[in-house]
Amino acid sequence: MSSRDAILQRLRHRTGGELTAPECDFSVLNRPDWSTAEKLDMFERTIESVHGEVHRTTESGWIDRLAEILQTRGAQTLLIAKEHEIGKALKNATENREDLPQLLVYDEAIDSWQETLFNDVDAGITSTRGGIAETGSLILWPSVDEPRLMSLVPPIHIAVLKASELYTTFHDAMQSQNWAAGMPTNALLVSGPSKTADIEQTLAYGVHGPKELIVLVIE
Amino acid sequence: MSETTHHSAHHIDVKEFHPRARAAIHNPQIRQNFRKAMDGLMTKRKSAFEGWDLETLRDLGANIRMRALANLPDLLEQLEQKLTENGVTVHWAADGDEACEIVRDICLARDAKSVIKGKSMVSEEMELNHYLEDQGIEALESDLGEYIVQLAEETPSHIIMPAIHKNTTEISQLLHDKTGTDLSNDVEYLTANARLQLREKFRNADVGISGVNFAVAETGTLCLVENEGNGRMTTTVPPCHIAVTGIEKVVPKLEDVTALLALLTRSATGQHITTYFNMISGPRKADELDGPEEVHLVLVDNGRSTIYQDDELLDTLRCIRCGACMNHCPVYTRVGGHAYGTTYPGPIGKILMPHMVGLDEGRHLPTASSLCGACGEVCPVKIPIPDLLVRLRQEAVDGDKLHPAKVRGHGAKRGTVEAMIWKGWSWMHARPGLYRLGTALGARFRKLQPGKLGGWTQYRTAPKLAAKTLHERMKERSQ
């Protein structure tokens, strides 16, 4: 008999008899109905407590803010998506202004340019599928257009979040967006820059992933 | 090395708990490192649950895990079916050796020479690194704590913080000796160097191996909880990802992970959430630009289906591996994780390991406890750890041939003299007349009582028999 069948058989013919499944009441996770402003305050407070940086901006002002942020950090290159409106807006903007870094488009399979991504990209910008106020988390839903490594390999990750897409809790976000109906190959909650406390519980940022997480909140 | 000798790679003797514990207690550095870390973790956990109805949340956690275990075989089949639909290959392993062989075969089929690993306690259970090295495949740990432990050629001393037994100076010296970094107590500098060295390894690894925190049956999703990003690197950069997990990690609904995650990170390190909560549901699709082209899941039994048979012991399988029980354990805090000599140390190890190594080898584990109850009080899924310790203590001295107990090696601690004493004790207690006569005689001849009572009086004074029995005193009062 295969190990699979042997394991399943042992589990099915339990000597202690059949088990009954208890009811699960998730109401302990419920939170009051916060307004968008309250959710944003909560989100900001929580993500900043773990070194995330939040910039409140607008539909018309975010590119200016982004240029400023990247200039202070001396970023030379910024990785963008090909089709997403964020990438398109940045491409259009570079035609009239000089203060943005050089834009790199993630439009080729990683296998051909892995070394460049690891060594020569200073920052990556992605969209989000909303945020979670209670835990200060961003929902990332990598896609063909915004591949998984955009938010992981460059030392600076910039995420664009619409304030109107903030949820109160993880449970709330998952139920509202009906995740159970189908998940992408990879989905993520990102709550701050990469960190470790493995050396004598001393916090250090940017151990494997981005050293900085910058959230542009569009109000 | 042949496959049959793999188990002998187990270089730590679990039975030698006492000498190791004694050595640790007399090592001020170890004592200090653990005390400091555990105090910090207890405080952080407490503040992370402020404002929560913690009892109700723990009830929910326990119920979610119980619901999953009640339907375990069906859920495993559903998980397998969903993952297969998503393009993930599912393997089943009866024990650690078979799981190692499955991993080896996947590596061989890809002609893989190097493996990068994310944190996985199941892979520690399998002793996978040693096995792969024997097969000529380099296996490198990428979690910073695991990386340090691997460089030191040690094993993790804590399931969440593997290198907690070392302080910064010790780690700095180790990294200097093994990787050539400067001696420095600047943690940022040490971390940045590890980042540099490991980035190259991620880029060039043929296979990435990770653990799994929760496996969701309804969507076929593998969830990983981490702060560093090494888990994401491991599961995204190499062309092949192998996840290894125990069969108990499955939950029916995606919704279930919301409550378990809330409990896990707060219980473990006092964080509201970790930096990354990574949900993997399949390999790279044809039009996607990154991610592994192959994803495998190895479901490891290794004694779990045996624990599953018994109504009490079953509770052990609820565990979500947060480590809160060790953080709050007065014994663990004093002897540290290595004294146990087991993959899982501390209270959870004491109830889990006897099933994996047998009660003959693990006979000291259930008794390495003061039964203070702290572990049971903080467990996020309400595993009655103290009750299970008592149950395993009973099994260790079990002598019932007609209704043999469930755990392998039961009765290993049974001594003929002790068994006879208790037999006599129970015989006498069932006969009131004889009992009174016995206690009366004991009181009369109490001067003859020996001052030393074996192990009992090694750290305690011997209890003294009273001059008069309780019955006699009661009789006097009523007169």
Image (cartoon, coloured by chain):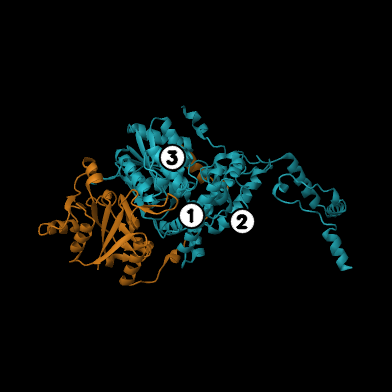
Q: As shown in the figure, which amino acid type bears the numbered disc 1?
A: Arg
Residue B333 spot, x, y in % from top left: 55, 51
Residue A45 spot, x, y in % from top left: 35, 66
Q: Residue B372, labelled with which disc?
A: 2
Q: Are marks 1 and 3 in contact (CB under 8 Å)?
A: no
Which residue carries the number 1 mark?
B65
The picture's colour for chain B is cyan
Asked if residue B99 can be seen in this view, the reply is no
Q: In front here: B108 or A175?
A: B108
Quarter-wise, where is residue B173 in the image? top left
Q: Is residue B239 above or below residue A168?
A: above
Q: In front here: B358 or A74?
A: A74
Q: As shown in the figure, which amino acid type bears the numbered disc 2?
A: Cys
Write down which chain is painted orange.
A
Mark 2 chain: B
Residue A216 spot, x, y in % from top left: 25, 62
